[in-house]
Image (cartoon, grey):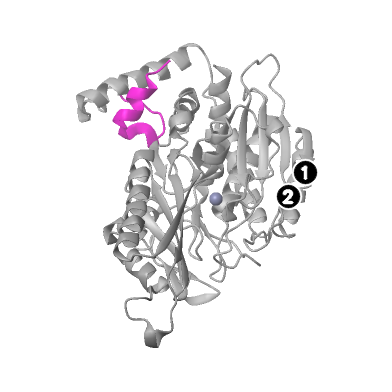
Amino acid sequence: MPDYEAIRTNNPPFLNTPPLPNPKTAPASLGEAQRVSYLYFLATFVTQHMAGEPLMISDEIRQFVQDEVRDRFLRYVQVYTTSDENNPNTPSTERQWDLLKILKAECEELGLSDVSLSEFGYVYATLKPSEGVDAPVFGLLAHVDTSPDQPGENVKPRRIENWDGSTITYPDDPELTLTTNDSPELAEFVGETIITASGKTLLGADDKAGVAEIMASMAAFKKYPELKHGEIRVIFTPDEEIGRGTVKIDEDKLPKFCYTLDGGYPGELEDENFDAWRVDLKVKGIGVHPGYAKDKMINAVAVTSRLVAMLPEWMTPEHTEKREGFIHVVQVSGDFENASMTAIIRDFEEEGNKEKVEYVQQLARLFEKRYPGLEIEVEVSHQYQNMRDIVRETPEVVDIAERAMIDAGVKVIRKSIRGGTDGARLTQLGHPTPNIFAGGLLFHSRREWVAESSLRKAAEVVLYLAKHWTEK
Ligand SMILES: [Zn+2]
């Protein structure tokens, strides 16, 4: 067993190259720590060959996965599945059924078991374990809806083969361009095949990349029995983009451990998200005829505006990044008698949020003192919590994901989600669910793109995930 932790930590440069070890030259060019992990790598390589064990993913399987995932992706993105936050139903739009029904039928075609489509638009399917394999069950989730932020109807995907690094233009919008200024990650993909939409719509790699990757890996498991796996549950969900992806999920069908394939750049692995709070202020002023208001009137909406102005500007979403938290005023409204304000409060640490909530509460008390007669009611609610603490109780869930990525030749990038995810909610329900990359970038925009190799790598990660779970 190689020391995966050492390999990951040292990020040796060979991870993205084919495994052709040259012990004479490569170690000399590496630092001591990298040399050590390089030796681990050599040891694995040698062990595999001495044991006569084939490298798990042959060129044939790789080609099969590449074709499957690309063809499925290009098909799925053309199905209109935009969700709608103004519709309270689940799914929030009838059109999501179109893709859900296709997926149900395709799961059946692949020979998956217990395939069902629930009345709330969730597809469930099970891949039975390989013969003789007894391993823990794990789940794979992806969402079928696309963001209402950009048009998602009539998506026309197109492939740019052997991209030469020049500015990408769009057939349906001559004004729109895509360069490495918009997306620095593009620079890594010169010479590869890039997929974009045509300029009028988003692409929908978020999250049809995840859907296609799961389906392609299921097809590979079915076609190549040498790819060993335990039982795997597949779940496709609606309405993730409007924050309702898990509200009607059938918990009985959820395995203890799951992964969402809904991240971005290859290698991204997210096991942390915001801890989230919300404060609602109800401000009651004193209304008096304005001509006779001296020393009597307290103008609720004016006072509320002053209170909002006292929230630190550096603690807003537009001035924070990475692991910094913020207070985000999402609405202020009212008149001179009554006003209200809502803010959402975010931080990775609950302590950090409690301080921010406390600050808002103190401001409210201060204003009541400053304006005798003013009443401010503060309502505080905890919206969701950081999945980190629960995920870390069972570290193997993330460890296995890391190993799978290393095996697939992808450099692991641990990230924290500056938001909430379906995985965060499932984790809170007791199903640790970290998020794995799906490969797309510039989500929710008309420049959204994905490289074909990223689609394949994510599907390969699933194959290796299964392998490592069988070693549990
Ligand atoms: Zn998504």
**Above or below for 251 versus 177:** above
The quadrant in which residue 220 appears is top right
| Amino acid type, callout 1 | Leu
Question: Seen in the image, is 32 located left or right of residue 152?
Answer: left
Question: Seen in the image, is 206 located left or right of residue 365?
Answer: right
Q: Which mark is residue 117?
A: 1
Give percent across and percent down for residue 358: 35, 48
Give percent across and percent down for residue 352: 33, 43
- From the image, which quarter does the N terminus lie in? top left
Question: Seen in the image, is 134 located left or right of residue 382?
Answer: right
Give percent across and percent down for residue 164: 40, 60
The quadrant in which residue 8 appears is top left
Q: How many marks?
A: 2
Residue extending furthest toward the top: 51
Question: In the rendered structure, are the residues bearing label 2 and label 1 in contact, judged by CB atoms less than 8 Å apart?
Answer: yes
- Please tell me whether residue 87 belongs to the stretch shown in magenta: no
Magenta stretch bounds? 1-22
* Residue ID at (47%, 16%): 49
Q: Mark 1 packing: few (<14 Cα in 10 Å), some, or many (20+)?
A: some
Q: In the rendered image, which residue does mark 2 sit on? A: 100
Q: Report if residue 129 is visible in the image.
A: yes
Q: Classify mark 1: helix, strand or loop.
A: strand
Q: Classify mark 2: helix, strand or loop.
A: helix
User: 413 or 427, which lies in front?
Assistant: 427
Give percent across and percent down for residue 253: 70, 32
Question: Seen in the image, is 356 located left or right of residue 272?
Answer: left
* Residue ID at (50%, 39%): 436
Q: Earlier in the sequence, mark 2 or mark 1?
A: 2
Q: Which mark is residue 153?
A: none
Cα distance between the residues tagged 2 and 1: 7 Å
